[in-house]
Amino acid sequence: MAGGEDTRRSGLTIQAIDPIDGKTCAVLISHGRLQFMKQLGLRAIHETAKMVPLALQKPTAIFEGLSDEQDEEKGLRGAGWRCYVTKPTTAFKATGAQHPAPTDQVFVVFVNHERVAYNWRWEKCDAVQTALPAGYEGRFRKRLL
C-alpha cells in the first residue's frame, strides 16, 4: 500500500488504443463498478473481462464528444469523452457460457475525460455500417478512428 492508498479498491487498469497518437493509454474501471458487475452475474463479469478489453484494444471505431447519450448527465459531454466500438464474434449467456454474438449488435464502451470506463453494453448496429452503432452520425461530435 503506497501513499496510504488501498490498491485493492483502486480498480482494474486496461490498456487501450489512444486514437490521437496510436499508442496505448491506461483506462480504469473503478472498484465500485467492478463490484456492481459482480452483482449482475456471470454475463456481466465475462463482458467486463473480455468484451471491454476487446473494445478498448481492437476497436472498429472510436468516437469523441457524446451528443445524445441518455445515460449521461447534462453538461458533462466534453470533447474528451469517448465511445469505443467493437463487433465481437462471441457473446455470453447469463450462465457465463459463450455463444455466437448477435449479428445485429455492436459492443460499446464509454470512457470519460479522466480515462475511466464508466459504462458498456450491447447496442443495435447501423443498418448500413454494421460495425458501428445505430444512429452514430448524430450521437457523436466526431469520429477519431
Image (tube, helix red, strand yellow):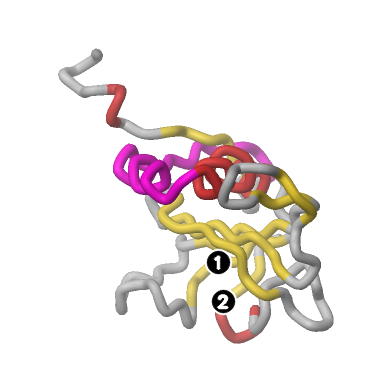
Q: Which residues are magenta?
A: 22-41
Q: Earlier in the sequence, mark 1 or mark 2?
A: 1
Q: What secondary structure is marked by label 1? A: strand
Q: Give the class, few, some or many, for how many residues have Cα within 10 Å of label 2's Cα (few <14, many ≥20).
A: many
Q: Residue furthest top?
A: 1
Residue 24, quarter of picture: top right
90 vs 55, nearest the viewer = 90
- Image coordinates for residue 46, horizontal then vertical, percent: 57, 42
Q: In the image shown, does 96 or 118 lie closer to the viewer?
A: 96
Do the CB atoms of the residues marked 1 and 2 lie less than 8 Å apart? yes
The disc at residue 64 is 1
Q: What residue sits right under mark 2 in the picture?
A: 140
Amino acid on which disc 2 is placed: Phe
Is 106 drawn above or below residue 115 in the view shown? below
Q: Split into 4 quadrants, where in the image is the C terminus?
A: bottom right
Choose between 29 and 141: the one closer to the eye.
Answer: 29
131 displayed left or right of 115: right
Q: Residue at x 75, y 57 (%)?
A: 101
Of residues 34 and 13, the one nearer the viewer is 34
Under mark 1, the amino acid is Glu
**Is residue 40 highlighted in magenta?**
yes
